[in-house]
Image (tube, helix red, strand yellow):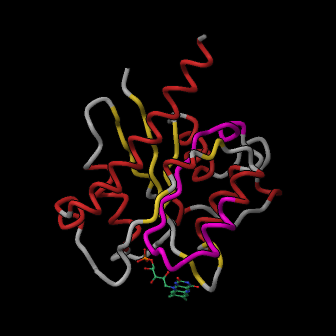
Amino acid sequence: MSLRLLAVSGSLRAASSNSRAIEALARLAPAGVEVEIYRGIGELPFFNLDLDGETPPAAVRHWRERVGAHDGLIICSPEYAHGVAGAMKNALDWLVPSLEFPEKPVALVNASPGARFAQAHMRETLTVMSARMVDEACLAIPLQGRNLTVEQMVADPEVAGLLGAVIAALARAIDSDAEAGAG
Ligand SMILES: Cc1cc2nc3c(=O)[nH]c(=O)nc-3n(C[C@H](O)[C@H](O)[C@H](O)COP(=O)(O)O)c2cc1C
């Protein structure tokens, strides 16, 4: 059975380096690992518990459903003003009251290694949300300022190696959790 990973970029910019990194990561997935890219976080309304009634907004239902349908989540998000990008934080807030998220294995990819605050904030948020943080899959990838295309990332041995290592570490953690659960 193949492993299913959901990858999401926290940047809404068309020429986003975080989104390109996610694209490159998806292309580097080995046989047996399927990476779906979630492109809908810009469609989510601002988090408001009043909207989370019997029938939450369609965009929210879709986001939760895709998270629930995957074995693990990969997040690659920029830092803005020493904080988590608002669109990404909003998407995470919508998962707080959801049934789909707790214990979900999560990898955090940092495409701007100089950005230290947002990664720590996001880790704190994900931890309190009961994510299963996979530390070995949380890697910094030196992309900032290089403006690499997706193809260049895939062809760059260092970048491709790090993106491949994220997938491999997340896959290993999910497999070992499954073995522990079965045993
Ligand atoms: C309004 C704004 C605030 C930013 N604040 C920070 C910051 O606090 N720390 C940092 O490392 N980079 C900061 N940056 C740089 C972005 O994180 C960087 O440009 C990143 O590549 C954007 O991601 P993207 O290419 O995926 O859109 C900021 C950029 C903007 C536009």
Q: Quadrant of the N terminus?
A: top left
Instruction: Name above or below for residue 83 compared with residue 183.
Output: below
Residue 40 is situated, as x and y percent measured from the top left of the image, at: 49, 58
Instruction: Name above or below for residue 82 compared with residue 159.
Output: below
Toward which corner of the image does residue 90 lie, by quadrant?
bottom right
Q: Is residue 76 left or right of residue 124?
A: left
Residue 159 is situated, as x and y percent measured from the top left of the image, at: 29, 62
Q: Is 44 in the magenta?
A: no
Toward which corner of the image does residue 167 lie, by quadrant?
top left
Residue 55 is situated, as x and y percent measured from the top left of the image, at: 72, 43
Q: Quadrant of the C terminus?
A: top right
Instruction: Name above or below for residue 137 compared with residue 71.
Output: below
* The one of 63 and 157 positioned closer to us in this rendering: 157
Q: Is 118 in the magenta?
A: yes
Residue at the (18%, 67%) spot, across then down:
152
Count of residue discs: 0
* The one of 102 and 91 positioned closer to us in this rendering: 102
Residue 82 is situated, as x and y percent measured from the top left of the image, at: 64, 82
What's the magenta region?
A: 99-123
Residue at the (47%, 74%) spot, across then down:
113
Instruction: Name above or below for residue 27 compared with residue 132.
Output: below
Q: Is residue 99 left or right of residue 113?
A: right
Residue at the (29%, 81%) spot, across then down:
146
Q: Residue furthest right?
A: 50
Residue at the (60%, 61%) spot, across then down:
44
